[in-house]
Structures are given as C-alpha cells and as structure tokens.
Amino acid sequence: MSFVSYVRKQGVFLLPLSAVLFVSLFAIQGILPVTFQSDSVLAQGEVRACKESATEAEKELCYEKSIPHLMDKGLSMERTFAVVRLIQQIDAGYQSCHVLAHLITGKEVAKDPSKWKDVVIRSPAGMCGSGAMHGAFQERFREDSFPDANVAEMQSMLAGVCNPRDGWEPTYLDRSSCMHGLGHLLLYVTAADVKKSVALCEVVAQLSDYDFRQTCLDGIFMQLYQPLEPEDDVLIHAIAPEAKQTRTFCAQFTGLVYNVCVKESWPAVPGSSNTSAGFEALCAQTTDRNAQITCASGLMYPVIEELQYDVPKVGEFCKGILDKGIRDICWARLASKFVWADWRNVPTALNICRAVVPQESKAACWEELESYAVQGMQHNSPQTKALCDGMPEPWRNSCSKRTTTQL
C-alpha cells in the first residue's frame, strides 16, 4: 500500500482525532474559542460574569457591555440571540433586553451597511421587544445622514422596508414596530431636524393598508428623549437643552404630533415613570380623552421597565392611579408587557390576569391579551394557542376565532 493510500485510508480516523486534540488543547488552556463552546456554556459564563451586579439595572448594563463582544469573537448574530434566550432562562430576573438587542443587530449591520434591510428581517421576533429591529435601523444611518434629501428621495431609500416579502411574514405588531424603528432612523437621516423628521414620518408611515404614523412619531421623539449611546447624545446635543423644556418644546406641535411629544418626553419629567401621580399628570397634558388613553397605554411599558418587571411594585403603582380607566390600562399592560418581552412568558401573563389583577380590572386584562394575540403573534401558532387557550370565556373563544387558532 502506498503512503498516499495509507493516509487517505487513515484520514477518516486522523481528522476526528485531531479535532478532539484541538478542542482538548484549548480546554486545558482555558481559552476555547466561543465558536467551539455550546450556547449553554456561553450563557452560563455571561450569567457568572454579571452575577455581582447589585441591582437589575446594573445587571442589564453588564450584559449590554459583555454579550455583544461574543460577535467580535466570531459568534453569529443568530447564535448571540440564542445565548440571550438561554440567559433569560437561567437568570429569571433578566427581562429587559431591548437595549441589548439594539447593540447586537447594530454590530451586524456595521459589518455591511448595504444589507441593513436583510438584518431587519433576520431580527428575532418574540423577544427583547423588537429592539433587534430598531438597532438595525439606527446603525444603518448612524454616520450617514441626508439632511438635504427631499421626501421623494427618502421614500425611495426606505421603500418597502416594513412590508411583507419573501422570507418575512410580519404580524401587525411587527410592522408597527418596524415603523417605530423607522422613526428613530429619521432623526439620524435628517441630522436631528425634528420638524423635517415629523414631515417625513407623515408621508412614509401612511401605507396603503395601515396608517403607522403614531408609532413612527413615537420613534422620533423616543430617539430625542432616550439616547442610548454616545453617538445618540452627539446627534441631539444641539437641541437637547430646548427639548428638556418639555411643555414649551412640545407646544410647537399640534394634534397627534403634540400628543406623542408629551408621551415620549417622560424621561425629562421627574416622577412621570415611577409615581402614579406623575404618570397621570403627564398624560393629562394631552388634548383629549382618546389621547390620554393612548398616552397611558404607551407610557406603561417604560414604567414597567423602570420598575424592573417587579410585579408587586407595578401593582402598587397601578393601585395608586385615581382614574379607573387609566388604572385598568395599568393592570392590562402589565400582563401584555411580559408577552411583548418574550413569547415564552405567556404563562406569566395569563397568571397576572388570573391571580394578580383585581376583579374590577380583569376584563380589561383579558381584552388586552386577546388584542395582543390578534395583532402581535403569528396566528394559529403554538404561542397563540397557549395564550388563547389559557383565557377564560368569552375571551378564549373570541381569541381563537380572531386568530384562526385551533384549540
């Protein structure tokens, strides 16, 4: 037998052996590349690295600093999100990964900004509250702005990004969240020209089938009032002092734009996100009852974030609200917030409506979850089935019909 024949014959044994030796060598040295480690091992390592954080807010910051670096070491975007899911299983107190998702998809878009629309549709649904999608938007135009572009040019640039297409069958909430991310993006595109961003939103967010101006405008003013990174602070530096005078700043707008400005100004209004009285007072600045309801509904999600998903604390917050209609919203949004954060939290949301929410607000809670199933989840999916099936009648039957879900 020739030497070449011998090597070819023995190669099937040599290759696996060499692979074992390679992995063993790195394991012995304690430097096994992340791409060779299991998602579970990586998740456990991240939890250990952040376990010394004294508060949940500090823990979030720890994860936000550490986890994106996994991509620098060769981990794909998809695997990085898989690690985040496992972290949330191990560390039950970690729910608020919206900012982390921004950072992960931002790194992915940075590899090739021309493929940003592909990253949008690759962004995972049902976790981190659509933060992944928003991060893809922001990264694409973080450095490239087009302050002189006209409406037609902008429409061409952004055409179809939030529409269903091959490989992406978004729910209504997915598309709404996409338009919210678009709002963030517009402030970058216009180099922080708020009025021009609003004008663009009025045009690009009115689609043939839905009017998404509300969520698009939410994104503009959220970008203004909630900068996440140093680049965001640089973007709004010139207008930040004016924007902090919230009543005067928002007064330059009217109607829907004014109401959105009021709601999103909460970071600059002390007490509006952590005291019941401040919460009610902020939304009372809106133009009418419908706007007040919309404000309270939208503002509850940041409240729950601020209170670290602590159900007893949020419950006390809800109890302190004087307006019965707003109080119902508080309880209802507490339940849906958990599903928004991650579809795996369906049992938690159902239990909140069943066992935590007072009897007087239970109907509002079940209606909220039914609405979320209809607008935010894939119809007749396992997650929708679990959500609808866990509701009492008449919401169980109604949820099943409206989502075409077989129970």
Image (cartoon, grey):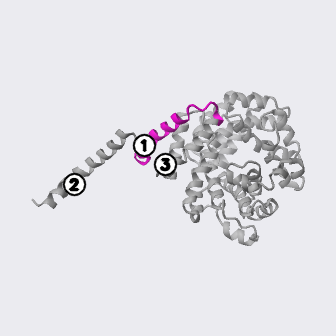
Quadrant housing residue 293? top right
Disc number at residue 11? Answer: 2
Q: Is residue 401 visible?
A: no
Q: What residue type is labelled 2?
A: Gly
Q: Where is residue 230 in the image (x, y as percent from the top left)?
A: 68, 51
Q: Which amino acid does label 3 sit on?
A: Arg
Q: Which amino acid does label 1 sit on?
A: Ser
Q: Sequence order check: which comes first, mark 3 or mark 2?
A: 2
- Report, in whole angstroms, how far the alpha carbon at label 3 lies from the one at label 1: 10 Å
Q: Sequence order check: which comes first, mark 1 or mark 2?
A: 2
Say if mark 3 contacts mark 2, CB within 8 Å. Answer: no
Magenta-colored span: 33-57
Q: In this view, does 199 lie above or below 384?
A: below
Q: Where is residue 264 in the image (x, y as percent from the top left)?
A: 79, 47
Q: Which residue is found at the position 61% from the left and 56% from the top?
A: 136
Q: How many dots with numbers? A: 3
Q: Of helix, strand and loop, which one carries label 3?
A: helix
Q: Which residue is found at the position 88% from the left and 56% from the top?
A: 254
Residue occupied by mark 1:
38
Disc number at residue 188? Answer: none
Q: In this view, does 237 lie to the left or right of 137?
A: right
Disc number at residue 79? Answer: 3
Determine the main secondary structure of the stretch shown in magenta.
helix
